[in-house]
Image (cartoon, rainbow, N blue to C red):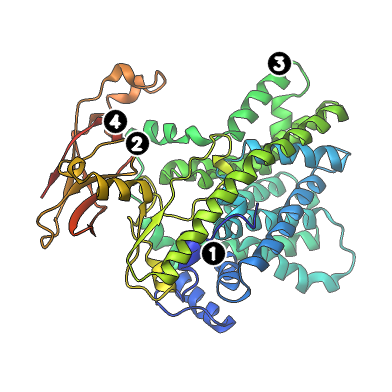
């Protein structure tokens, strides 16, 4: 699955020294790049050092091998952290694999995509390993320098994971002061220094200040309903209620005993809520600790091996669906790279890969999405072009391109077909670049709004706005004519009735 996941988005960006168009060729280049990155973008020096190490020097094949080892280490670290709860490594790791495959959101971005794996999977593995170090009883004080460095490295990972976890550890050791030993003090001191390096990064504060809009009470409902892509936390809540009703656990005792995970979940959830991140992988930081608590809950019940074997068999069966989808996606990626490398045309034609809904979470498209909800580029993949020394490339669906060439009359007016990822219209004034593109929206039929949103829909901008400015558009010459391409956004695409060009 690693091998069939293409380089995508940030992977191409990190092939270059940050802020330049010079490719990374040495460790010194990476250090210089991450210094600029730390000052201007965010403080994740270590995880992005790994990304650029593979991107610029070691290569994707090496990453595939190392990432497989890290994933295995992640599952083993989960099981070892639960050693006092679930005696069987086989049972605990099997449950963890099932939860990862079917519940952790954004699996392809968190575990398979190179930039995402280094940011999330690797950071989580470092933190779980740190938790194991806290449990180990070191006898010799010769370990002090090594433990201090280990603490810094584990704390200086991903702020979404380490800040919540670090806060939980602080609360736990305030409640259990007698458990603080010299080696735990050294480890935690190093860890909090690592977290501090994340927090004080000028780039992190710059990125935070660029968050779209300040959080307020009126933004709470829409921010909450953006959480429809979480799975593990709701499952945890349901299991807590069920286990409590069956008197398998005492909720208060269980939550108190696991205050570290509870604090991490709460802080990370509130942070994502406040910043209104909509991407699935942004949820990983609290879904991870929710998964750990679910695994601990299962320690209170006896699980027969037959159910674990069935679960593992189901995972193997799923791979028969996943691998063919990944192969088609990867072949499309290779064909596009071949076009870019061998063809001087700025237009690169891509296949429309129809992915089975069960497999979407496992397949990472190498292209930027045309949806405004998350991505910031449109049509052109600038960093892929830079890598191949091309001024500009534009990725266009093969089917859309063929329709424009063969049926141009259908594009003399705006084509709102759902079969295309963008809105397209023939554009006669090709020398004049529009200052603004505005979507004209019909009023919302509130009866069609999902029932759980109806009480709040009248106050939610996505349902009340009458026009929406679209910053993403492009003019592309095709077959002797020029066409205006405008990005779609899933939030309002069913309400678009016209598009104004200003």
The residue under label 4 is 494
Residue at 49% in and 41% down: 270
Dot 1 or dot 4: first in sequence order is 1
Depth check, front residue: 165 or 392 = 392
Dot 3 or dot 4: first in sequence order is 3
Q: What is the distance, in whole Å, between disc 1 and disc 2 at their CAs?
A: 28 Å
Residue 343 screen position, x and y as percent: 39, 69
The residue under label 2 is 219
Indicate the secondary structure of the residue bearing disc 2.
helix
Depth check, front residue: 493 or 288 = 493
Tell which tag, 4 or 2, sits nearer the viewer.
4
Tell which tag, 3 or 4, sits nearer the viewer.
4
Residue at 29% in and 19% down: 446
Q: What is the distance, in whole Å, between disc 4 and disc 2 at their CAs?
A: 23 Å
**Relative to 352, 346 lies left or right:** left
Mark carried by residue 44: 1
């Amino acid at each position: 699955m690693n091998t069939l996941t293409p380089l995508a988005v940030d992977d191409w960006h990190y092939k270059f020294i940050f802020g330049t168009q010079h490719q990374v060729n040495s460790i010194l280049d990476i250090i210089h790049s991450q210094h600029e990155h730390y000052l201007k973008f965010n403080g994740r020096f270590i995880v992005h050092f790994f990304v650029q190490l593979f991107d610029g020097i070691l290569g994707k094949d090496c990453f595939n091998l190392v990432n497989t080892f890290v994933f295995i280490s992640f599952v083993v670290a989960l099981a070892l952290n639960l050693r006092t709860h679930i005696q069987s490594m086989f049972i605990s790791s099997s449950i963890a694999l099932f939860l990862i495959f079917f519940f952790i959101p954004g699996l392809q971005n968190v575990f398979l995509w190179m930039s995402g794996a280094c940011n999330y999977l690797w950071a989580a593995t470092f933190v779980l390993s740190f938790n194991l170090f806290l449990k180990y009883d070191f006898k010799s004080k010769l370990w002090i320098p090594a433990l201090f460095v280990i603490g810094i490295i584990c704390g200086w990972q991903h702020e979404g994971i380490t800040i919540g976890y670090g806060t939980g550890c602080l609360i736990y050791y305030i409640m259990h002061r007698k458990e603080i030993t010299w080696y735990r003090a050294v480890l935690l001191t190093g860890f909090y220094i690592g977290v501090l390096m994340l927090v004080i990064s000028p780039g992190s504060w710059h990125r935070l200040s660029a968050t779209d809009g300040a959080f307020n009470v009126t933004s709470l409902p829409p921010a909450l309903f953006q959480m429809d892509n979480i799975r593990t936390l709701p499952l945890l809540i349901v299991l807590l209620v069920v286990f409590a009703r069956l008197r398998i656990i005492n909720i208060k005792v269980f939550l108190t005993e696991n205050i570290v995970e509870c604090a991490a979940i709460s802080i990370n959830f509130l942070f994502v809520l406040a910043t209104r991140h909509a991407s699935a992988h942004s949820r990983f930081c609290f879904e991870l600790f929710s998964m750990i608590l679910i695994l601990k809950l299962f320690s209170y019940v006896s699980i027969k091996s037959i159910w674990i074997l069935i679960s593992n068999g189901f995972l193997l069966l799923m791979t028969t669906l996943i691998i063919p989808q990944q192969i088609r996606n990867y072949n499309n990626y290779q064909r596009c790279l071949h076009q870019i490398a061998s063809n001087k045309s700025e237009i690169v034609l891509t296949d429309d890969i129809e992915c089975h809904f069960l497999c979407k979470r496992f397949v990472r498209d190498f292209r930027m999405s045309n949806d405004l909800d998350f991505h910031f580029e449109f049509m052109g993949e600038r960093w892929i072009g830079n890598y191949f020394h091309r001024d500009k490339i534009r990725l266009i669906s093969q089917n859309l391109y063929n329709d424009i060439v063969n049926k141009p009359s259908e594009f003399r007016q705006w084509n709102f077909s759902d079969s295309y990822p963008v809105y397209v219209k023939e554009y006669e004034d090709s020398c004049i670049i529009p200052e603004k593109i505005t979507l004209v929206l019909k009023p919302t039929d509130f009866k069609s709004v999902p029932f759980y949103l109806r009480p709040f829909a009248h106050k939610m901008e996505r349902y009340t706005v009458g026009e929406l400015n679209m910053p993403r558009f492009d003019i592309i010459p095709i077959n002797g004519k020029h066409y205006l391409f405008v990005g779609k956004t899933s939030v309002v695409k069913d309400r678009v009735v016209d598009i104004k060009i200003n």
